[in-house]
Image (cartoon, rainbow, N blue to C red):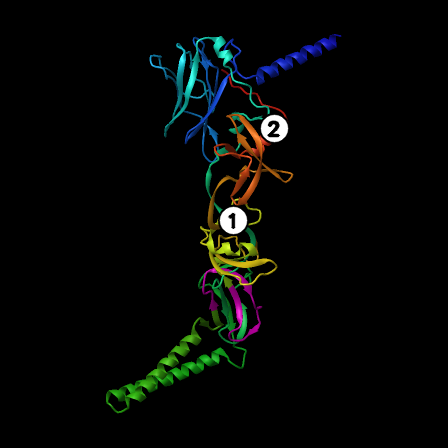
């Protein structure tokens, strides 16, 4: 029996403690359910809870102020003033100011109304960079506690999920109001990366000879700079087309041509040789000089050196050290990786829309953000004129962002100029469960509803919502999974909103 009594007392104590933690704050000794409002400005979100305003009763405000942006965060500083401004002539104006939050994001001003009537309640947040004003346009100050109880609001909908500000401030959280906005028709397809015309340069042999590489570390993917030595060609041990022999012959021919030219020049000055003969000797001398310069370019005692004509990356080495090559034979292929071509397969019924291509996104497998085709300066090179297994090939040239390697596969969202007005959300707002998609709609400062939505087209970053939401509703764009996990856990952290 004693153990049973002890267990019962302990259980009652736990229930009382939990109720004290979970029960909404009320006016002092009134039992009134608190009012709550959620207001927005370009800078801030205000979620405020306070007891109904009654003459002579002190109302304490729990003003939760969140700084808007890519991630919603609690204000950790600032001055907040609350103004009770009469809408009925002759009533007094009251105000109270707190100069810092009691904890990050929560300010606690208070008011004790002196006259009943209709008022406007304004909250003015002063920061170093700006001043924000958020207003409740019409609010009743009651003349008695009984009148306030009669007007007490109804309980919240049972399908709402509670997710506290203190929870949202600790994670990456954001929401946005839905509105109709222009949205392009999108062709979603896949593609493969190919080398762009003119982006590759082939270094070829300029004479017959034996190959030696300037370094044995040349492997596909190695970076080379313009002018860097790549290959040495030697023909010393070759009987035919020996470079050294050709150079000796070229020097001899140059000396002969030079002597003939100088002799004819002297005779021409004395008008002892026809002008046509002099011009022919001059041309022979210049041609012999050019031939020798060509043969001796990048020549040393070890052979002839070939250098990289551009800066880029080794795509392929076509020869081995010691291999004999002939004039014109490819030695090394260099790719500049400045531009690539994307070959996409477009469904036959979307072929006509390609002519109105205006942009879109390109996304590598495993990436979420992707790249804007406009920023990549994408342009249509050609559209295939035949159908291959139900698809038409489309070729796009884009600037390489560094990770677009030939042979890689990409995901494409091709936008056309046919635009429509649509409700769209970032893809981060979508929660998938067993093939169905949901979003969380914020119905109040700390209340949310899970909505099943029907999806339309996607452009790779945003998705059209065809049903389940309405314009003006605020959809959670970041933090939806945290709300889901919190609702599944069945527990609610201590609120801590004292009034």
Q: Residues within 10 Å of mark 1 (few under 14, many from 20)?
A: many
Do labels 1 and 2 touch, CB within 8 Å? Answer: no
Q: Quadrant of residue 453?
A: top right
Q: Nearer the viewer, residue 444 or 452?
A: 452
- Tell me the residue at 50%/10% (across/down): 28
Q: Which residues are magenta?
A: 306-333
Q: Nearer the viewer, residue 168 or 185?
A: 185
User: Does 311 appear in magenta?
Assistant: yes
Q: CA distance from mark 1 to mark 2?
A: 35 Å
Residue with the mark numbered 1: 186
Q: In the image, is residue 197 above or below residue 134?
A: below
- Tell me the residue at 38%/80% (across/down): 287
Relative placement, left or right, of 362 versus 288 is: right
| x and y percentages locating residue 268 in the rendered image | 26, 88
Q: Secondary structure beneath disc 1?
A: strand
Residue with the mark numbered 2: 487
């Amino acid at each position: 029996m004693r153990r049973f009594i002890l267990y019962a007392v302990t259980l009652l104590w736990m229930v009382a403690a939990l109720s004290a933690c979970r029960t909404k704050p009320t006016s002092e000794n009134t039992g009134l359910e608190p009012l709550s409002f959620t207001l927005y400005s370009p800078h801030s979100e205000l979620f405020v809870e306070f007891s109904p305003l009654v003459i002579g009763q002190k109302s304490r405000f729990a003003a939760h102020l969140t700084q808007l942006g890519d991630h919603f965060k609690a204000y950790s500083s600032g001055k907040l003033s609350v103004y009770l401004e009469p809408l009925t002539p002759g009533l007094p104006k009251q105000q109270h100011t707190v100069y810092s939050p009691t904890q990050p994001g929560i300010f606690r001003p208070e008011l004790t109304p002196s006259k009943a009537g209709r008022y406007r309640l304004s909250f003015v947040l002063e920061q170093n960079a700006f001043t924000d004003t958020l207003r409740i346009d019409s609010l009743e100050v009651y003349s008695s506690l009984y009148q306030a109880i009669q007007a007490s609001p109804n309980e919240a909908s049972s399908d709402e999920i509670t997710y506290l500000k203190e929870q949202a401030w600790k994670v990456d959280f954001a929401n946005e109001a839905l509105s109709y906005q222009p949205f392009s028709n999108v062709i979603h397809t896949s593609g493969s990366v190919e080398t762009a015309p003119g982006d590759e340069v082939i270094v070829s042999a300029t004479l017959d000879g034996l190959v030696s590489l300037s370094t044995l570390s040349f492997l596909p993917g190695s970076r080379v700079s313009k002018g860097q030595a790549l290959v040495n060609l030697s023909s010393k041990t070759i009987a035919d087309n020996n470079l050294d022999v050709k150079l000796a012959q070229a020097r001899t021919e140059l000396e002969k041509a030079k002597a003939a030219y100088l002799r004819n020049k002297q005779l021409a000055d004395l008008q002892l040789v026809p002008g046509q003969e002099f011009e022919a000797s001059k041309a022979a001398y210049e041609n012999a000089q050019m031939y020798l310069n060509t043969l001796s370019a990048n020549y040393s005692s070890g052979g002839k050196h070939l250098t990289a004509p551009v800066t880029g990356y080794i795509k392929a080495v076509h020869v081995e050290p010691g291999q004999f090559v002939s004039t014109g034979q490819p030695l090394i292929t260099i790719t500049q990786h400045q531009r690539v071509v994307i070959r996409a397969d477009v469904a036959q019924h979307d072929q006509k829309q390609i002519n109105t291509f205006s942009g879109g996104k390109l996304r590598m497998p495993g990436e979420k953000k992707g790249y804007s085709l406009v920023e990549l300066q994408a342009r249509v090179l050609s559209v295939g004129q035949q159908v291959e297994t139900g698809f038409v090939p489309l070729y796009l040239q884009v600037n390489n962002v560094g990770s677009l390697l030939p042979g890689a596969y990409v995901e494409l969202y091709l936008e056309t100029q046919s635009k429509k007005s649509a409700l769209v959300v970032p893809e981060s707002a979508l929660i998938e469960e067993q093939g169905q998609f949901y979003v969380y709609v914020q119905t109040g400062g700390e209340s949310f509803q899970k909505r099943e939505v029907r999806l339309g087209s996607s452009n790779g970053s945003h998705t059209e919502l065809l049903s389940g939401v309405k314009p003006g509703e605020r959809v959670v764009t970041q933090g939806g999974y945290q709300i889901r996990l919190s609702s599944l856990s069945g527990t609610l952290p201590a609120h801590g909103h004292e009034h």
